[in-house]
Image: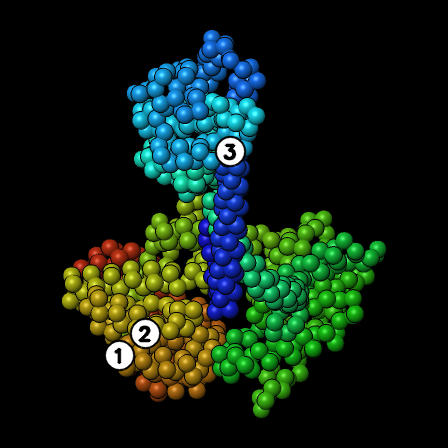
Amino acid sequence: MNRSRRHILYSASGRVPWMIAAVLLVLLLVATVMLSRAFRLAEERDIERYFDSIATHIETDLLDSAGQHGAIQSRMATRLAFDGPFDQAAWQSDAAALIEDHPYYELLAVLDGDFGVRWIQGGTGEGIVPGEVFPLSPQARARLARRPAPANTVALEPLGAVTPEPALLFMTPVTVDDQVVNWLAAVMLVPDSIRAMLTGFYLRDVTLSGDFGGVGFAIPGLETTESTGSGYRRTLSFQLGNGRSDLKIDVALRPETVDQMHSALPQFILVFGSVMAVLLVIAALLAMAAARQARVLSGANRSLKNEIRDRELAERELQFLIAHDSLTGLPNRQGMMRHLEQAIGAVDEGHQLAVFFIDLDQFKDINETLGHHLGDELLRQIPDRLARELEDEDVLGRLGGDEYLVVAQRRDSERVTRLADRLLGALDKPFRIEEHQLFVSASIGLAFLDASSPSPGELIQNADAALFRAKQLGRNQHAMFTPEMFAQVEYRLHLSRDIREALDQEQFRIAYQPIVDLETLEICGVEALMRWPHKDGYNVPPRDFIRVAEETGVVHRLSQYALSRAVSDLAGWQKDFENAPWLAVNISGAQFREAEFVRDLSVLLHHHRISPDRLHLEITEEVLIENLARNRDVLEQLDEIGMPIVVDDFGIGYSSLAYIKNFPISTIKIDQGFVRGIQDDADDQAITRTICDLSHELALKTVAEGIEQPGQLALLRRYGCDLGQGFLFMHPVSAAEIARLLAGPPPWAGLLKTHEESRDLLQGRGKTS
């Protein structure tokens, strides 16, 4: 029985099914036994009837044969009586013929009235000779003395003295005028006569034995052996005329005959019935299991139908979710691709199909400052504002994050441009969310369907490129796609691929520009600058690959590479030189926002055994104000471990005195844009002087970058600027060049002598005047 069938049987397990099966099995087995027994009894009855038939045939044959022999002897006696003085030779001839025909006649004799032997034919026994008295017992004589009926043959008891085996004497009177004148004596061997008298086919199936006058005898050919045991046995009794002696014949059915008459049907019925009973019980169990299984399957089918219905509903919902944004309910990127594909194939004649790629400006600040729940609510309200400016045929979708997409048809590009202006204007009013009033702007990239961009993907890609251009132009405006933008996008894509390859192959190089004390012109620090000599033979500008690295998420790996190499070089200088400079490194916004930024930086310094005050972190104003609360925590952690913070490119951004006052800042770096025009531009002079004065009042140091001329150096020293760097001192060089610089006098040492001469000259003129 296989596993599934066992499972079905076991699934029908329980008291009631098994009790029913047990009762059914018992009933079937009882019926089988009774049926087998009935067939066995029927066979026994058939055998019994057959045996009764054989016994009846034997008895009938013996009686008929005895009657026939009595008639023969009576006829012979009658002929003796009619023939008078019967011819002895004729009688002996008849007697010889009779003995020849019936060999079991031992002898025939003619006796006179006194039982004397007159004639004899056949074997002679002791004392049986002509002239002698025939040996009869007194009882036989008395029996014969009674007057028998004429020609009536009398059977007498066995003659043991006449024959060596049991024999029967028949005495037939020969009468004349009712007077017995002679006797016809016939001695018949009982075993041989019985065997001769029984000639039926049934003799092959039985065994016979006899008893005559208390003497047992065997019948030739039908002997009974001692090993013969049969349940079918019968004794046939024949009463002799004297009333005292019986001839008994034992008839028994042969065992092999009984075995032949017994068939295998009862046994077959017993075995087959038992097997069928077991099979029927198993079938009943299976039927009960099937019924139960059918009920279970019926319930399972109902459950399956419900599940299919629920799954169909879920699939429809899933299809909706696949094509729609869960936050706003608008079509998502996949849904917009479908709408755009349909719109491309159904552009009205005389109309232009335009795609508007909308991205919110500085949405990340709102999300990080006020929380994601407010940011999500803002994302839900913005589509309502935008939808007011759209027509019914226009489609608005959300691509993800703070990016939306509009697909619209207009008659000309001027109407498309006006729609872009209205979409920007729709966001001018503040959004009221809980107790907050949020102001948000957006940048929009426009792309038109034309032969160069026939697919939805290309249209969205072109609009994305135009959006990037709008961001570069200052945000809160829109830009229309041009083929040149595609070249820029392709350039950025190639850069994003090549940056990873360059990192894997360590193609990036770290250059160092000395930072000089403007009073003594001694080197006090170096700024680490990353350079990328591209494999194609040109140098990639840092602003290009850093921006692409930030957009593609590789900036962390790039910053880690630069920081690790720079700190390693600093450790080498400290090992070789006592006057080793401190190291200034630029930190990007993405790097500054990392959760483990401070910990990773501390581990790196500890690994190279560098004091935290030897590493200056340069951070732009834009990065500082992105998330004021979080940035304050990070800056305070850096300040606690003694790491100086430098505000890079000060003066071109927000230049807020509040964050300078509240943040743990140690140095302000004046942007090179002010230094470049400081000799000729009074405004640059005023701004630079003000920054230096303000820094001194706040106990901050100042660093001027981009110093290229001695006049710039002189003015900066006059304004009290502490530190400076630029081509006037040295271009960015390798770590090995910095090591050689530390080993000897700097190449700008002559600037100090020139400065002192100029100062003395100015002082002398003052005294003369």
Image quarter hosting the C terminus:
bottom left
Task: Count the numbered circles shown.
Answer: 3
The residue indicated by pointer 3 is 148
Q: Is residue 300 left or right of residue 748?
A: right
Q: How many C-alpha atoms fall within 10 Å of the one at disc 1: few (<14), some, or many (≥20)?
A: few
**Residue in the image at 21% along x and 65% along y:** 608
Residue 175, image x and y in percent? 53, 25
Q: Residue at x 59, y 84 (%)?
A: 438
Q: Is residue 231 above or below residue 363?
A: above
Of all residues shown, which one is farthest toward the right? 349
Residue type at mark 2 is: Val
Element at badge 2? Answer: helix
Kind of residue sitting beneath label 1 = Ile
Camera-nearest label, 2 or 1: 2
The residue carrying mark 2 is: 598
Residue 326 located left or right of residue 514: right
Marks 2,1: beta carbons within 8 A: yes
Comparing labels 2 and 3, the label whose residue is closer to the camera? 3
In primary-sequence order, the first of circles 2 and 3 is: 3
Mark 2: few/some/many CA within 10 Å (<14, 14-19, 20+): some
> Residue 741: x percent and y percent?
23, 59
* Displayed quadrant of residue 79: top right
Residue 641: which numbered mark, if any? 1
Asked which quadrant contains residue 713, the reply is bottom left
User: CA–CA distance between discs 3 and 1?
Assistant: 164 Å
* Residue 9, image x, y percentages: 49, 59
Q: Say if 125 sits above or below 407 in the image.
A: above
